[in-house]
Amino acid sequence: MSINLTAEQESVIQQAIQAGLIRSVDEFIDSANGALSHRKDGFDKTRARRAGERIREHGKGVRLDPKGESIRDLAHAGHKY
């Protein structure tokens, strides 16, 4: 099989190899095929929104330290003047 890549696509693959993210073009293609198999159902905005809501709900009331600061308190600590 022959595959024709644009210059931009080839550049992305070469950058990934140089960065050590993949070892070869074959590995890149294998990774892409794996990613496609996970997208069988496509992107569902409703499911994604519900998942985000569940994540936010799980984070409510979670305490990280003995002082009783929540994740939200710690995340916003750097914004206080």
Image (cartoon, rainbow, N blue to C red):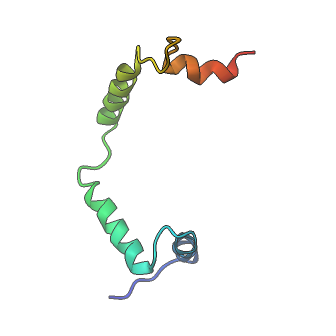
Q: Is residue 60 above or below residue 40?
A: above
Residue at image coords 58%, 24%: 75
- Indicate the position of residue 61 as horizontal and vertical percent values: 41, 13
User: If the image is split into quadrants, where does the C terminus sit?
Assistant: top right
**Drawn side of residue 79 relative to residue 69, left or right:** right
Extreme residue in the bottom direction: 1
In the foreground, 50 or 61: 61
Residue at image coords 38%, 75%: 27
**Drawn side of residue 71 relative to residue 32, left or right:** right
Residue at image coords 45%, 79%: 24
Extreme residue in the front direction: 66
Q: Which quadrant of the figure has residue 37?
A: bottom left
**Drawn side of residue 79 relative to residue 59, left or right:** right
Label count reads: 0
Q: Is residue 29 above or below residue 42?
A: below
- Indicate the position of residue 8 as horizontal and vertical percent values: 57, 72
- Indicate the position of residue 22 as horizontal and vertical percent values: 46, 71
In the foreground, 20 or 56: 20
User: If the image is split into quadrants, where does the N terminus sit?
Assistant: bottom left
Residue at image coords 57%, 77%: 7
Q: Which quadrant of the figure has residue 11?
A: bottom right
- Indicate the position of residue 50 as horizontal and vertical percent values: 31, 28
Extreme residue in the right direction: 81
In the foreground, 52 or 22: 22
